């Protein structure tokens, strides 16, 4: 199966679980502008693209964490070792990307 598709496509998740903690806790949390729950919590964030986690309180500054995705060289090396087809599959699906961080800690300020 790995030979017919890319290594990252088979072995790597499409999302990263990001730990979100606020001080104080119990604050609404938004991922890319959508409320996903109250802190502290884990949120599932797609590995592709840029994403922002922010606080959802009226009257609060929009402090937040920005997460960028990047290609991990290990997936490329595995794809090259297994052939051109896996390299193409992972490149087209973008599955060899992952987020640069997996923790967001925010302090509520006025």
Image: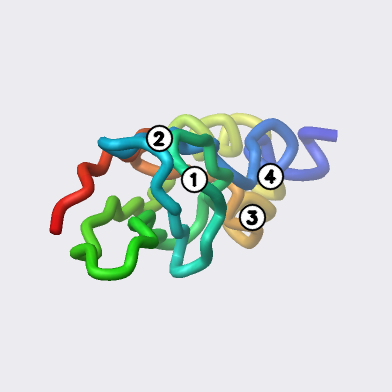
Earlier sequence position, callout 2 versus callout 4: 4
3 vs 108: above or below? above
Earlier sequence position, callout 4 versus callout 1: 1
Earlier sequence position, callout 1 versus callout 2: 1
Please state the total of marks drawn on the protein image. Answer: 4
Q: Is residue 41 left or right of residue 27?
A: right
What residue would you read off at disc 1? 38
Q: CA distance from mark 1 to mark 2?
A: 17 Å
For discs 4 and 1, the disc positioned in front in the rendered view: 1
What residue would you read off at disc 3? 88
Dot 4: within a 10 Å radius of its alpha carbon, few (fewer than 14), some, or many (20 or more) residues? many
What residue would you read off at disc 4? 86
Q: Residue at x 57, y 56 (%)?
A: 94
For discs 2 and 3, the disc positioned in front in the rendered view: 2
Confirm or deny contact between disc 3 and disc 1 (CB under 8 A). no
Q: Quadrant of the C terminus?
A: bottom left
Q: Residue at x 46, y 58 (%)?
A: 31
Confirm or deny contact between disc 2 and disc 4 (CB under 8 A). no
Dot 2: within a 10 Å radius of its alpha carbon, few (fewer than 14), some, or many (20 or more) residues? some
Q: Element under label 1?
A: strand
What residue would you read off at disc 2? 102
Q: Element under label 3?
A: helix
Q: Residue at x 30, y 55 (%)?
A: 66
For discs 2 and 4, the disc positioned in front in the rendered view: 2
Q: CA distance from mark 3 to mark 4?
A: 5 Å
């Amino acid at each position: 199966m790995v030979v017919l598709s890319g290594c990252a496509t088979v072995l790597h998740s499409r999302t990263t679980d990001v730990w979100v903690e606020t001080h104080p806790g119990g604050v609404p949390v938004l991922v890319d502008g959508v409320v996903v729950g109250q802190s502290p919590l884990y949120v599932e964030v797609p590995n592709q693209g840029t994403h922002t986690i922010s606080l959802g309180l009226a009257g609060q500054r929009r402090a937040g964490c920005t997460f960028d995705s990047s290609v991990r060289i290990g997936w490329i090396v595995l794809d090259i070792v297994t052939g051109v087809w896996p390299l193409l599959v992972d490149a087209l699906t973008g599955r060899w990307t992952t987020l640069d961080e997996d923790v967001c800690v925010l302090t509520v300020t006025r």
